[in-house]
Image (cartoon, rainbow, N blue to C red):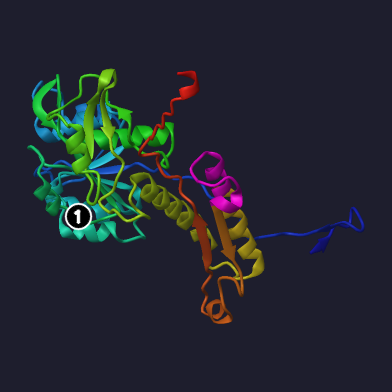
Amino acid sequence: MSSDNSYPGVYIEEDATPTLSVSTLPTAVPLINMDSDITEILKFNNILDLYEKFPPSGTYDTALAGLRAYFECGGGPCYVTGWKTFTDAIKTLGNRITLVVGNYHGIKDEVYTLLEDRSKCLFAILDGPAVHIKKSDLNTYQTSASAAVYYPYLKVGWTDVDVPASAVAAGLYCKNDRTRGVWKSPANVPLPSGYTPKYTVTDTIQADYSTGKAVNMIRKIDERGSVIWGARTLDDSDDWRYVSVRRLFNSVERDLRYALGTMTFEPNSPLTWEKVRSAATSYLHRLWKQGGLAGASENEAYFVQIGKGVTMSDEDIKQGKMIAKIGLAAARPAEFIVLQFTQNMAQA
């Protein structure tokens, strides 16, 4: 504290500790497996970038058809590589990506290990089989709350090759996140005109693949055209059954981890704890007001705890550990709409 001689009795206090706020990072930046021999990592910001690298010639292979479909369905900036370098590309890109996209057979066991690494907060969008689906196909997929499968491949007028469902779903994830938010399930979302499922999905098929290791179907529904009709992960547990819940937690973890990184080496003291509590609370309040969290009140929607005797012991503080506990109630999708009709016999 120092005095200003020009104004006796007026003192200046300087606070050199950093301010803390939590920003929302991009939620849908995919690495797409082209299922080809490409060994470099390519970045495309839009469909014009794609055409500059691969000029349209009127003929497509499945990989290029998928990339065009990705952008036509609402996709934004993405990274692309081949199946041989897919795992290495995930490690190289680090937190620049949030989604990994491709044919299941290009997804090696090591990729699943990366999906389960909570520090990476990745989510995988995978293709179902290219032919008629069978129950035995589900044995191909590992149980994972960080992955979802989409079926069937699609047909579109500008190519004779099949368009991968994973690329279409990835584009719709991007569009959904921009227009609604990561907490909104990327389902009941119409595809662009002209996109048609290669195989017809009936109610019976839908029911057969909607539990356990669920497959998210793409169906033609009435006059709406083709829509994604499913919002499930490859994990049927109550906590992580839905794509939107897993991805919301991924997003919150990434945002808070990035913001709290600025507090590293700050004094592990009540002043710092209050800054962390205030910033995290403000971030979660915004999320709740946007509709991303369940609960009629803030207390029902989330909590932030930090402090000595609350989340940290004396030993934790001596070891340089600042521990915050954060809880949130994710809004779950209304997957089944049940209508109950009662006839009033007195007026019949």
Q: How crowded is mark 1: few (under 14 residues within 10 Å), some or many (20 or more)?
A: many
Three-letter residue code for mark 1:
Thr
Front one among 109 and 342: 342
The reply to whether residue 20 is visible in this rendering is: no
Q: Where is residue 180 in the image (x, y as percent from the top left)?
A: 43, 34
Front one among 125 and 25: 125
Does dot 1 land on a helix, a strand or a loop?
A: helix
- On the rendered image, what quadrant is the C terminus found in? top left
Q: Position of residue 70 (x, y in %)?
A: 24, 32
Determine if the magenta segment contains residue 291.
Answer: yes
Residue depicted at x 21% and y 33%: 203
- On the rendered image, what quadrant is the N terminus found in? bottom right
Q: Is residue 42 left or right of residue 348?
A: left
* Quarter assignment of residue 207: top left
Q: Is residue 140 left or right of residue 252?
A: left
Name of the residue lying farthest toward the front? 346
Q: Name the residue under label 1.
A: 87
Residue depicted at x 66% and y 60%: 16
The residue segment tinted magenta is 284-301
